[in-house]
Every structure is written in C-alpha cells, then in structure tokens.
Amino acid sequence: MDPYSAEGELINIHSYFHQGQYQEVIDFDTSALSPENEVPARVLALRARIALGQAEDVLAEVQDESEPEFAAVAALAQSALGQIEDAVQAIEELARSLGDNQTIQVLGGIVLQAAGKSDEALALLSKHSGSLDAIALITQIHLQQNRTDLAVKEVAAARRWAQDSLLVNLAESWVGLRLGGEKYQQAFYVFEELAQAPATSSILTLVSQAVCELHLGRVEEAQIALEQALQKQPDYADAIANLLVLTIITGKDAAELTGSLKKFAPRHALLVDLEEKSDLFDKAASKFSAKVAA
C-alpha cells in the first residue's frame, strides 16, 4: 500500500507538509508508525525544518546517518544554504547508484532544478513509479520552463488514477494559474478552502490564495490575505514579494517592501528577475545617446 494514500499511515503528515503546515509535520506523533514508514516520516520532518530555516541544524544532524535518504536530505540542506556545487555533486552520486529510490528522486529533483539543471532533474524524476511527489515536481519544472502543455499532460494523467489527491488538486491549480481565464477561479477555490479552514490554514496557502485574488483583480482581498500571512511570519519572503507586486499594481511606493525583501531574501526570484531586467535595460539604453537641440 502507498503510505501516502488515503488509507496509508503517512497521509496526514504528508498532507501537512504540502499544505505548508511545517510545525505540524515536526510535531507529528510517529511512535505508532510501522518500521518501514519511520524513515519517510523523518524525511518529511527534516524537510519541514529546512523549510522553516533550520537547514544548518538539519545538515549537522544527518551527516553521520547511513541511510541514503538522509544523504539526500543533507544535499537538500546544502542547497538551501547556498552550497549548490556540493549539493549537486552529492545528488549526482546518489542518482547513479540509487536512482530508483523515491526520496532521492524527489529531493534530487529539487536540488538539480534549483541549480538550473532542469534536464537532469526531469531525467531523475522520470524514473518514479507512481509517485505524486515526483509528478508535482515535474509539473512545477515544466511550468518554470514555460512548457504549460507538458504540465497539463502530467496533471491530466495523474488525475486519472489519483482523483482525490491533495497534490493533484494543488498541481492542477498551479497549472490553472498559468492557463488563466476560468481556471483562475477554480484555483482560487482550492487555495481559499485550504487557507481559510483552521485545520489546513498556513502561510503558504494564504499566499497562494492571495495570488489567485490578484489574478482575479481582487486587490483588497489579496492584500488582506498577504497581511494575514505576514502577521504569522513577518519575514516570509514570498508574502513580502507578492505584497510588493500588489503595491506596485496599485501605484503606491514599494521602496520599504523592496528593502524588506532584500533584507530577508536577497536572492529571491523577484529581485533576481528585476536585476536582470534592469541590466538589460541599461545595456539597451547605452546604445543610444541623447540628442541635444542646438
């Protein structure tokens, strides 16, 4: 039986993780789990700690572990700490000998994609055998590659055999936000239900709801959701980044939010993109000289 299925032992801790309820993952009682599920549960808890900014502690904890799953966790922690080359080298070594290990596939895919090695990430993830985590990650990579057509096919195939899965609903919503139109509203329903229910609400789902609201033109509602997220965690970079975008859309001064994002996440994707666009503009502008009238 798939331990992450509706009847499996890990369904709740797995759902907590993908709902962004990382503290619930860490606090999850694993004492009654069967032996074969102890390692997957611990991997989820370690990933949750990395997501909460505890990568250094996680790396120190797993360095002497013998299981290959924890070697993959160590590489994920290294990646989070900016030790990209070491992380990629570790994953490539693990993939060569243990490429059929689901944890190595998923964590390896994350590390390789973060390093800009999309083809290697997809090659590793393609070895999965019915892993929804791998499918969700493949979908994200295709979206980052602007291959929405491939992301649509990936999710549609998963929907046929995992109809009620949280991960399929999330992946379908990610794709919907790229497709637009009526898909915006469908994605909103998924994230709004998660964000507003006390049992499933998290900073991640609040930000996801806000992104849907922005696409639907509901600026005030988006701002409320983002402010709720920042009340829970003032340094949450994605909430700051989306509030920054909202502020610009509404014609307000975003200098303070830009400063906050630079402080808490200096290499955030939004800042990197803005820097690249600024450099391109400067290069283009340098080709032209102002004409001075006599």
Image (cartoon, rainbow, N blue to C red):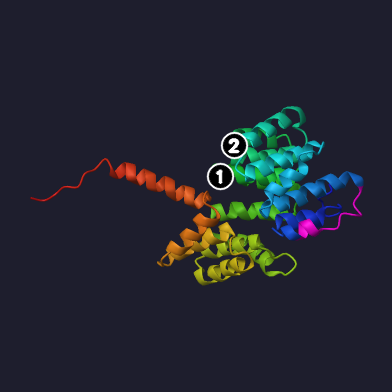
Q: Identify the amino acid type marked 1.
A: Gln
Towards the viewer: 84 or 44: 84
Numbered-mark total: 2
Where's residue 20, x and y in %?
A: 69, 58
Q: Main secondary structure of the magenta part?
A: loop
Q: Secondary structure at mark 1?
A: helix
Q: What residue does disc 1 label? A: 144
Q: CA–CA distance between discs 2 and 1?
A: 9 Å
Q: Residue at x 62, y 46 (%)?
A: 140
Where's residue 37, x and y in %?
A: 86, 47
**The magenta stretch spans residue 175:** no
Q: What residue does disc 2 label? A: 118
Residue 292 seen in the current view: yes
Where's residue 44, x and y in %?
A: 76, 50
Q: Secondary structure at mark 2?
A: helix
Q: Identify the amino acid type marked 2.
A: Ser
Q: Is residue 270 above or below residue 110?
A: below
Q: Are marks 2 and 1 in contact (CB under 8 Å)?
A: yes
Residue 153 seen in the current view: no
Q: Which residues are magenta?
A: 24-34
Label 2 or label 1, whichever comes before in sequence order: 2
Image quadrant in which you'd find residue 80: top right
Image quadrant in which you'd find residue 264: bottom right
